[in-house]
Amino acid sequence: MNSIKEIWSTLKCLPFAVLVHDSKTRNYKANESALNLFNLKQHSDLNENHFSHIKLISPLSKKTLLLQNLFDVYLIPNVQNKVVLEVDQTAFLLNIKFANITETVSMITFEIEKQTIDEQYNFDVVISNISADLIDIQNDDVDKHINYALKAIGTVCHADRSYLFKFNDENTEMSNTHEWVNKGIMPFKDSLQNVPKSELPYFFKLMNDTYLFKVNDVADLPASAGGEKKEFELQKIKSVMCIGLSYEKELVGFIGCDCVAVKREWTNLDLIRIKLVGEILTNAFKNINYKQKLELTQQQLITANQKLSELVNTDGLTNIANRRCFDQTIDDEIQRCVRYQQPISLLICDIDFFKKYNDSYGHQKGDEALKQVAETLQNLCKRPGDLAARYGGEEFALILPCTNTDNAYCFSTLIQKEIAKLGIEHKYSEVSDMLTLSIGFYSLIPNTKTIAEDIIAKADAALYNAKETGRNKISESPPR
Ligand SMILES: Nc1nc2c(ncn2[C@@H]2O[C@H](COP(=O)(O)OP(=O)(O)OP(=O)(O)O)[C@@H](O)[C@H]2O)c(=O)[nH]1
């Protein structure tokens, strides 16, 4: 007995598709014709997974089969069987023959039953796949599906060319967006861009009135269709059939088929089929439009929500975080520091003698001073998690996660330095010629029982102490 290797070197040269299967290793071998038929790349180690893109259907029961089934149960040795193969949106009716080579190795030969490739079946498969896909279509897949649909309608109607035209927003020009051409037929898509609709008045009169333009022989067109006749003759079109596509009761484009090689008496079936494709594409465009509108609305909502959340959390005068944001953040940061066993510090700063500042320099100047102080505090909060918030009128709070007592004290001195650098004159202050801050802070390593209110109360008490002991001071709770 020859080895499988030797047998295969002979089998693979057969002029039709051959598939060999080893039930022991579960591997397949495919000759060049089989690779072409199944749309496979050359592979030394083929298994069932490599065939996952194909579909095999029993033409009698319409049941889907696995490739394995062909070798297992489907075939009686040396008896001719048939199977429908769907690959790459095309269906073939195949004649298959099965033979055992060894106990574990068997082979199948496939021949396309050329004369009886079921055109209607092929069309139905393509159309049903496309319409199913288009229900949930993503924008980038649309072109592929339109091209499949045009190929299907062109083939089934025995046309040489099929196409989709869309009108511009002003409804004055038409452009050929998709085109399928039969072998050896010249494509015209590129030269049919932004064509004025006014050049084809006869065509558009019929299109607008009936959504249909069906001509079996272009030579029979009336004299009033001079422009159309010229255009068709230029493209060597003998027969043409077009169906209008509408959106919200308006004609937005059309699809059509041309016969170039021989003219065609368009049949009722041709008309039904092209109408079907037209309807599918119209629905797809509606879906896409609807989806785009929906996505736009969703995006607008997200942006509006972001803006709203920013507004809700921002102090209107100083543009830094407000009390609401502070309340939310302090709870979150306490939780985080509990989780990571890190210290947290809270600083509360209050402008000294601010009432006097307001009374003397005016409310507007007072607002300006608040804005400058806020900006300074905000700029000092550089680490992720740091937050400067306007806590009350002239009171600011700073949340500093991962910051212990010593660091909180350093940070407080830095604040005072930076405020001093602003050099805001305050002649009516009793502690300085310049605007100053009193700062109270509290630091701790929080645990699960720690609550924000306690931390705030401690930092507040420290601030009170800083005020009581002379202002322009830093005070810690409990005092050092
Ligand atoms: N310009 C301006 N002033 C404000 C704002 N919010 C609160 N204030 C003023 O801040 C002042 C705070 O006064 P007090 O609470 O008496 O405190 P103070 O004068 O700074 O005195 P000490 O804190 O004890 O140094 C009041 O005059 C408030 O009107 C604001 O948004 N703009």
Image: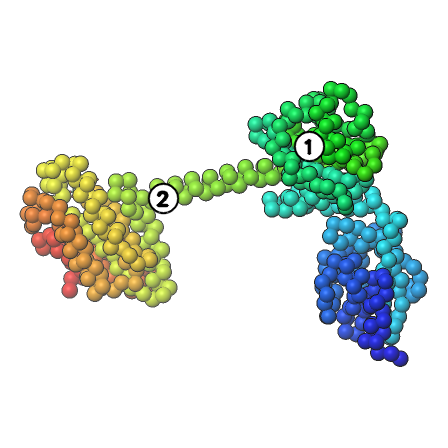
Amino acid type, mark 2: Glu
Q: Image quadrant of residue 278?
A: top right
Residue 382 visible here:
yes
Q: Position of residue 136 (x, y in %)?
A: 64, 44
Ligand 1, by image quadrant, is top left
Tell me if residue 420 comes above or below residue 181 in the rendering. below
Separation of marks 1 and 2 at Cα, in angstroms: 48 Å
Q: Which residue lies under the disc numbered 2?
A: 310
Point out the frontmost of discs 1 and 2: 1
Q: Position of residue 222 (x, y in %)?
A: 77, 21
Amino acid type, mark 1: Phe
The residue positioned farthest toward the right in the image shown: 79
Q: Name the residue located 38 percent from the left edge and 43 percent from the top edge.
A: 309
Q: Position of residue 418 (x, y in %)?
A: 17, 54
Report if the beta carbon of the residue with label 1 is closer than 8 angstroms to ligand 1: no
> Which color mode does the image show?
rainbow
Query: Would residue 173 be found to the left or right of residue 277 on screen?
Result: left
Q: Which quadrant of the figure contains the C terminus?
A: bottom left
Tell me if residue 353 comes above or below residue 207 in the rendering. below
Q: Name the residue located 39 percent from the left edge and 41 percent from the top edge.
A: 307
Q: Image quadrant of residue 293?
A: top right
Query: Would residue 355 be found to the left or right of residue 131 on screen?
Result: left
Q: Name the residue located 19 percent from the left edge and 62 percent from the top edge.
A: 410
Q: Position of residue 472 (x, y in %)?
A: 12, 53
Q: Which residue lies under the disc numbered 1?
A: 254
